[in-house]
Image (spheres, grey):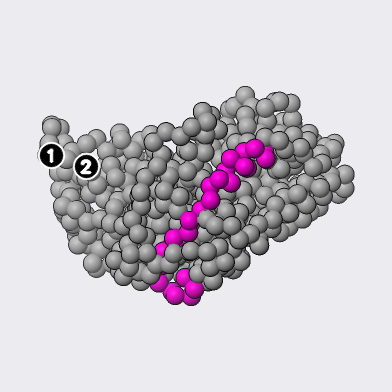
Amino acid sequence: MKAATLFVRCLENEGVDIIFGIPGEENLDIMDALLDSNIRFITTRHEQGAAFMADVYGRLTGRAGVCLATLGPGATNLVTGVADANMDRAPIIALAGQASTTRLHKESHQVLDLVSMFEPISKYSVQILEPEIIPEVIRKAFKVAEAEKPGCSFIDLPENIAAADVADKRPLKVQKPLPPHPPQEKIAQAASILADAKHPIIMAGNGVIRAGASTQLVDLAEKLNIPVATTFMAKGVIPTSHPLSLGAVGLQADDYVSCGFDRADVIVCVGYDIVEYHPYLWHKTQDRKIIHIDSLPAEVDEFYIVEAGVIGNIGEALKGLVTESRHHAQNKVTNLRDAIVDEFSQYAGDTGFPVKPQKIIWDLRQALKPEDIVVCDVGAHKMWMARMYQAERPNTCIISNGFASMGIAVPGAIAAKLTHPERASIAVTGDAGFLMNSQEIETAMREGIAIVILIWNDSNYGLIKWKQLNEFGRESNVAFTNPDFVKYAESFGAKGYRVEATDQLLPVLQQAIADNTVVVVDCPVDYGENLKLTQKLGDLICPI
């Protein structure tokens, strides 16, 4: 059989059901082999969109999302989405065609050393130089990408290797090792530290969601009466409505949740990566006891010196702590929790226009079911969503905060809808991030994928303007103009609505979800609230 056919069979063997990408000359044999496969190929309008789709697919399923490009510029267009997935710990397989091996040794049209280019942004980067090694390479690529901590495997397939004949080769058996149980003595050590703690706090990271350990986390918090803060990427790991939830930490400024860290004597970091929220921002004093519960040892950092490391299966570690620990009734966070809850609802009845960020988030939450998914882009709106959106389930508010790339929301929402077709999927984006990958509206329309795109429209790079005004008191080159987003949506055959009064927002969102197609909602936003929030947090007195 042809090597390309073996390649596709190996992908099938790994359980691949969707590939996102763009055909090219150097992946012609792979594209032809896919016609005889049950793998669904979704043709995107840009390779970056394909990589972001694979990124969110991997994050939601725990299985590697797959994206495909041709050589040269096709492969370089994957880079941002691949880097995002790798740093956000989403399993992803990036595939690229390559020129024939007969011209790789010299300057040649569209030829780059792709393996070297992808090495810094992947866990495994390889070129297939013999058709016989295809089963081993693909098995290793998936094994590495999906192992903790997940990330990218990149495979470069030269066109003459893909076209070659190969005999007596078949896919390898898929094997997935279970994470080891954490040592009992380390669980006992952590339990002893918690027994002496006066004001412990838990910081939950995205690793808790990857481990499927949300229930065990809540069980520990409830038994020991420990409040829980989450990173942006772990929103929903404890329901926001839970009385021990302090919401998300990561605004890079003092906030209500920061009060809990300032008061804490023991900080329990569960499934936490320092790329999610650097420890110098929440552990400036370097004098708190840190318990590190994760699948891998802690990164070395002067602000993250671990008192006890419980390494292994996160869920088993948490269950072990529940068994070993005694009830801890001293920790009282009622005032802090009340302040956070009050702020969530403070703008529920606000009628100011343009719409305040707090009101947009309130109405969005009212329009969605607890299991519906929002994929948040990067910008000023991300800071508001991360801080105030009330996620009730894990993986229902997808935020990129490792690499934090603009442009993820629209392709990410497409992947979320493909992964969970029974749920509403909402792309929450600024006007700048929207236009970075808005071409994928055509992909969604062609494939019949219903998503709602909620645009926070301010005709500015709002987050940068916010920081410029804070730092220098004036803005620099952040303003731009936008197209008519309603007409833009309609030009793709999608629907578009413009919010022209604040009381229209909730019914428009409800209608957009009910339309069951691609819908763009253009909502003017009042980012004057940004500087008010900065002032408020600067004057914050902890309510404890």
Question: Residue placed at 16% from the left, 52% from the top?
Answer: 25
Please state if 157 lies on the left or on the right of 173 as rendered.
left
x, y (%) of residue 73?
A: 23, 43
x, y (%) of residue 51?
A: 36, 51
Do tag 1 and tag 2 residues touch (Cβ < 8 Å)? yes
Placement of 16 over or under 133, stated as above or below: below
Front residue of 180/330: it is: 330
Task: Say whether disc 1 or disc 2 marks the residue closer to the N-terminus.
Answer: 2
Front residue of 420/232: it is: 232
Q: Which secondary structure, mark 1?
A: loop
Placement of 230 over or under 368, stated as above or below: above
x, y (%) of residue 111?
A: 18, 38
Marker count (numbered): 2
Question: Residue placed at 37% from the left, 64% from the top?
Answer: 486
| Distance in Å between CA atoms under marks 1 and 2 | 9 Å
Name the mark on residue 72: 2
- The magenta stretch spans which residues? 511-537
- Which kind of residue does numbered mark 1 sit on? His
Placement of 154 over or under 290, stated as above or below: below
Question: Residue placed at 58% from the left, 27% from the top?
Answer: 300
User: Is 246 part of what is drawn in magenta?
Assistant: no
Q: Which residue is mark 1?
A: 109
Front residue of 466/227: it is: 466
Quarter the C terminus occupies: top right
**Quadrant of the rendered image containing residue 276:** top right
**Quadrant of the rendered image containing residue 50:** bottom left
User: Is 535 part of what is drawn in magenta?
Assistant: yes
Name the mark on residue 167: none
